[in-house]
Image (cartoon, coloured by chain):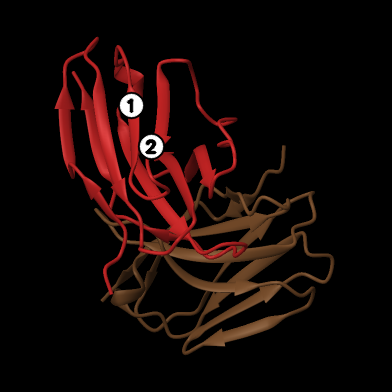
Amino acid sequence: GAGVSQSPSNKVTEKGKDVELRCDPISGHTALYWYRQSLGQGLEFLIYFQGNSAPDKSGLPSDRFSAERTGGSVSTLTIQRTQQEDSAVYLCASSRDKTYEQYFGPGTRLTVT
Amino acid sequence: TQLLEQSPQFLSIQEGENLTVYCNSSSVFSSLQWYRQEPGEGPVLLVTVVTGGEVKKLKRLTFQFGDARKDSSLHITAAQPGDTGLYLCAGAGGSNYKLTFGKGTLLTVNP
């Protein structure tokens, strides 16, 4: 079956511009996660959606970052007024209800020049 | 804040050698997972361990969860170039199923 998909795969933007990153989770998965990964590093948690519950935004690094999930499926991560330190790979993962196993998309590589 | 420390950070070995990667924490986790990530791709789940002292084998890979559920190890026997990648451990400790990831071990197996 189809896995988690993310778009775009690569994004180059100028400092100060806004960007939107998209995630399509596996059909039927109720939980969706966003992570950020710097070169060769582990994953930094950003935000977590579970069903209709209020999202856990505790990992968002600043108020320039926001995310929404429409209809319990597709999610968009928005970064406003991008900074060079925002350059990283942004990974999305989804999972079934009340399980620990997460399935990851291929990521979006964001480069802020 | 729960932290997971992985060691070593980098490991370069020859094909056929054995290796062990460690994942340690001062916190207790309800479950722990190992992922492998290849360049340009997202992490892929290898195994989940949930019981203290649990040992799971996946072909040449052996995973162990510590008795106190604070640490884990991954042992690879007779490593092959296809084992090359970033190995990440991740722990779950709360009721919200959110994972805490270690920084990873970058393994290179040379032919």
Marks 1/2 same chain: yes
The image position of residue B38, as x and y in percent, is 31, 61
The Cα atoms of the two marked residues, 1 and 2, are separated by 18 Å
| Chain B, hue in figure | brown
Label the red chain with its letter: A
Q: Which residue is mark 1?
A: A78
Q: Please state if A102 lies on the left or on the right of B39 as rendered.
A: right
The image position of residue A29, as x and y in percent, is 45, 61
Q: Is residue B70 above or below residue A1?
A: above
Nearer-the-camera pick, A40 or B20: A40
Q: Picture quarter containing residue B23?
A: bottom right
Judged from the image, the secondary structure of the residue bearing numbered disc 2 is loop
The image position of residue B10, as x and y in percent, is 45, 54
Q: What chain does badge 2 belong to? A: A
Q: Specify few, some or many for label 1: CA neighbours under 10 Å numbering under 14, 14-19, or 20 or more.
A: some
Among the two numbered marks 1 and 2 on one chain, the one whose residue lies closer to the N terminus: 2
The image position of residue B71, as x and y in percent, is 72, 62
Quarter of the image with the N terminus of chain B in it? top right
Nearer-the-camera pick, A37 or A58: A58
Farthest residue, direction right: B68
Judged from the image, the secondary structure of the residue bearing numbered disc 1 is strand
Q: Please state if A61 lies on the left or on the right of B63 as rendered.
A: left
Q: Is residue A44 above or below residue B12?
A: above
Tell me the residue at 56%/49% (across/down).
B101
Residue type at mark 2 is: Ser
Tell me the residue at 24%/32% (across/down).
A110
Nearer-the-camera pick, B45 or B89: B45
Residue type at mark 1 is: Thr
Farthest residue, direction bottom: B59
Question: What is the number of the mark on residue A38?
Answer: 2
Tell me the residue at 24%/24% (across/down).
A19
